[in-house]
Every structure is written in structure tokens, then in C-alpha cells.
Amino acid sequence: MIRILSILAVISVIATSAQADGRADDPRELQRTYAAALVYVPDEVHGARRIGIGSLEDYLANHPHPRLVLYMHGCTGIVEIAHVAGRMYAQAGYIFVAPDSFAREDKPVSCRAEIPEGGLHRAVLGWRQAEVDHAMAQLGALPGFDGTAVVLAGHSEGATTTATYSGYDFDARVIEGWTCNAGWPEYIGLNAPEAEPVLSLVGKRDPWFRLPILRGDCGEFMDGNDRSVVFDRDDPLYKQHWLSKEPNVQQIILDFLDEHL
């Protein structure tokens, strides 16, 4: 059973068509996002070590049956948030791979972070989902990848991608900074199979979701093996968008994955 709710509504932003326009899945553009991926691996000395994507095959050869997080960054690209996430996951024993959507030669603006305002490029969701497909195809072709437990995770725009993606099966999903509610039907809900455990985390008054149509949380679309964490008025994260910089939130994520992997 696919857990996604289709609701027709109108959102008050100017946007392009939701349909992919041929640029979303251009193989050359997709390969740029994978080739420029941010990669962290566990390191016995430092806890986490950054390597190039081209070195991942050698790493897998020496570390069989690993756990891996495929991470989708937010609308501002690979910034501090992604690096903090990469080190967190690597220190916990995960390989971390974050394709860089901004490595595309053609990358329309999808948000203004300083306002904050999203929804400037409606079709970006299809672009990001295509990046998941491409990264999984590339990773799956690496010797030593068989048997790898893979988590799909993302923040903000990357969390929307994580929530709505359908295609490859994952061992778990982590959604940070998204409500699963929107005015565009393709952005609404969860599109994960029932068997995939999903964790979502959101501040109840996250400033990115001021419009009533964006409010809520992913819990309304979840089943028994999922968990929705909403930071309410009595929590310092009530109005925050980046949640996993806090050690207690990192622990929530890692405990959830340890429980289900």
C-alpha cells in the first residue's frame, strides 16, 4: 500500500509547471550531481573522513556490507547542514553520500533562503527525485555494494524529495524540516512502502511553513513502524528549520535507525 494523499489545492506562489521538462533526467546533468557528491566515511582515528566519490569503490572493497545514507540537501545546496549531517552519520558508522544538485549546468532557483521563501521552481521535485534514481543506479553498480543497508534522508527540499520519492526500496527514511503538507498534490504525503520505517522531524512553527496550507506534520500519513517528532511551543526548536545540529535530535535519528536496521 502506498501512503500518499492527493489533495487538489492552490498555493499563492508563482511557479513553473510540475511536469519534468526534459532537463530533470538529462544523463549528463545527473552524472554531474553524482560526480560532485559530498562523501563522508567512518574513520577509526577521527570518527569521520571526507573522500571523493571516485574513492568509494576502494572503500567498499575494504569494508564489506556497510550501512549507507543517501542524503538529499536543501534548496541552498551543500552547505554547513550537509557537512554536519555527513560527519554525524559517518561517526555513527554510516557511509554518507550527498549528490550535489547545484553541480548541474542548468539549475533554476527554487528558493530564497533569506526571506525564507520556497516554491519558486515547482518542477524541482522531479529533478531531485531523478537525482535519487541516478545515485542509486551508480552506487548499485559498485562492486561490494550488494547487501548494503541504505537510508534515504534529506533536509528541507531534500526532505520533500525523501518523503515523496518512489522507485528504489530503502531500509529507512529520515525527513527533516518538512511537513508533508502542500498546495501541489505531488508534494503531499508519503510515498514510501509500508515496510519502510520513516522518521520525520519538524518544528511546529518552522518559518518556512508560514502559509496555513503548509502546516502540519508527516504523522498524519504514517503507519505503525513510522515516527513523527514535532517540536512544540515548549521546545527551543519550535521555530527552527535546521534541527539535527542539536545533539538530542541527532540521537533521536540514530536511535531510530538502530532500532530498524
Image (cartoon, rainbow, N blue to C red):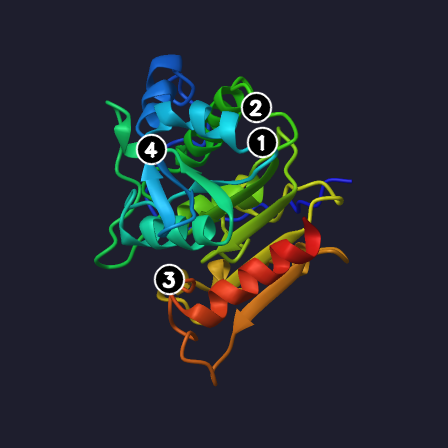
CB-based contact (under 8 Å), mark 1 and mark 3: no
117 and 152: which one is in front? Answer: 152
The residue tagged 3 is 242
**Circle 4: element type:** helix
The residue tagged 1 is 64
The residue tagged 2 is 144
Q: Which tag, 4 or 1, sits closer to the chain's start?
A: 1
Q: Position of residue 134 (x, y in %)?
A: 47, 23
Q: Position of residue 70 (x, y in %)?
A: 49, 38
Q: Name the residue type under label 4.
A: Ser
**Circle 1: element type:** loop
Q: Is residue 93 left or right of residue 226?
A: left
Q: Residue at x 32, y 40 (%)?
A: 50
Q: Position of residue 28 (x, y in %)?
A: 34, 14
Front label number (1 vs 3): 1
**Circle 2: element type:** loop
Q: Residue at x 59, y 47 (%)?
A: 173
3D distance between C-alphas at marks 1 and 3: 33 Å
Q: Which tag, 3 or 2, sits closer to the chain's start?
A: 2
**Circle 3: element type:** loop
On residue 101, the disc is 4
Q: Name the residue type under label 2.
A: Gly
Q: Name the residue type under label 1.
A: Pro
Front label number (3 vs 2): 2
Residue neighbourhood size for the residue with mark 2, other residues' Cα within 10 Å, grouped as few (<14), some (14–19), many (≥20):
some
Residue neighbourhood size for the residue with mark 3, other residues' Cα within 10 Å, grouped as few (<14), some (14–19), many (≥20):
some
Q: Which tag, 2 or 1, sits closer to the chain's start?
A: 1
Q: Is residue 223 left or right of residue 101?
A: right
CB-based contact (under 8 Å), mark 3 and mark 2: no
